[in-house]
Amino acid sequence: MTHVFPPFDPEKPGEPGKQPRKHRSIGFRGKEIPIRALVPSMFTMLALCAGLTAIRMAIEGRFDVAIAAIVLAAFLDGIDGRVARLLKASSRFGAELDSLADFVNFGVAPAIIVFTWALGGLRSMGWIVVLVFAICAALRLARFNVALDAEQPAWKGEFFVGVPAPAAALLVLLPIYLDRIGIPGVQSLAPAILVYTLAIAMLMVSFVPTFSGKLIGQRVAREYVLPVFILAALFVAVLLTYPYLTLAGGSLLYLACIPLSFMTYRKRAAAAAEVAGAQNGSSKRNTARAPSDRHTSA
């Protein structure tokens, strides 16, 4: 034994006879690991630190800092995958670490915040509901990881199945946003917050399609580069100046978009089924016509 720590192996070999998943291969050789392979996991670790900090702040009753930590974790979670693809440093290790961090950041931490802020007075009932929320986050992340291996039509990449865990974590904190912007009596509506928390948990594991936004921003026309910079700066400025108003408005807008995403998904699915039916009908007609052609030529 020459080393204290085991060697870092982000692409550990899987079961015999199984091909590794193409979207998680880093593609380097040799004993040394390039620094670029570590950068995405560093972002994930920073997000995990933010989630754990949110739990501590919730226990201490510092909910403003706790919510800021959740928002920071969601931001880091949104860029770590893009950084990995940009640096061509995606790996199985990074994907598994990301899922574990997401469970803490968007399953456990929001549950602790909601419980300590409003549901603690309901005792066991409140604790059961936040347990359900955390468990639903774990189940959603597990289902998402399994779905990565499934081959799907390209148009389905525009939708998530259910509400993603980062969005659910920000949505479940909506009562706190409303309380902070001055709406009176929100914190005293513990039964309503309990039902709302349970509803967001169910949305995570549901089959309700929601817009993914993965395809947004992959390419930007040259004439729109400066407006994009301006809008990004404006959003950050508004978020920092009016954080709870921005988060509350964003959460309500997201909830309002769920029916729209459902109807859009239904239309896309119907159009895809119609195209597939037309192609199948055309192939059947060609197959039926082939024997008669051969007979005529004979």
Image: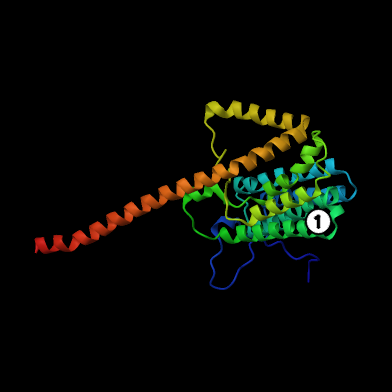
Judged from this view, the residue extending furthest toward the right is: 60
Judged from this view, the residue extending furthest toward the bottom is: 16
Q: Could you tell me residue 42's position as x and y percent?
A: 73, 50
In the picture of the structure, the residue carrying the numbered disc 1 is 126
Count of labels in the image? 1
Is 52 above or below relative to 292? above
Q: Quadrant of the C terminus?
A: bottom left
User: Residue at image x 64%, y 65%?
Assistant: 12
Q: Could you tell me residue 76's position as x and y percent?
A: 71, 45
Q: Is there any visible trace of residue 104 in the rendered image?
A: yes
The image quadrant of residue 283 is: bottom left
Q: Amino acid at mark 1?
A: Gly
Q: Could you tell me residue 160's position as x and y percent?
A: 58, 50
Is 42 above or below relative to 254? below
User: Residue at image x 62%, y 45%?
Assistant: 82
Q: Could you tell me residue 127's position as x and y percent?
A: 81, 58
User: Residue at image x 72%, y 34%?
Assistant: 246
Residue 3 located left or right of residue 94: right
| Residue nearest the observer in this picture, 132 or 283 | 132
| Residue nearest the observer in this picture, 216 or 272 | 272
What colouring does the structure picture have?
rainbow
Q: Quadrant of the N terminus?
A: bottom right
Q: Judge the density around disc 1: few (<14), some (14-19), many (≥20) Cα neighbours within 10 Å.
A: many
Residue 238 located left or right of residue 145: right
| Residue nearest the observer in this picture, 294 or 37 | 294
Q: Is there any visible trace of residue 35 in the rendered image?
A: no
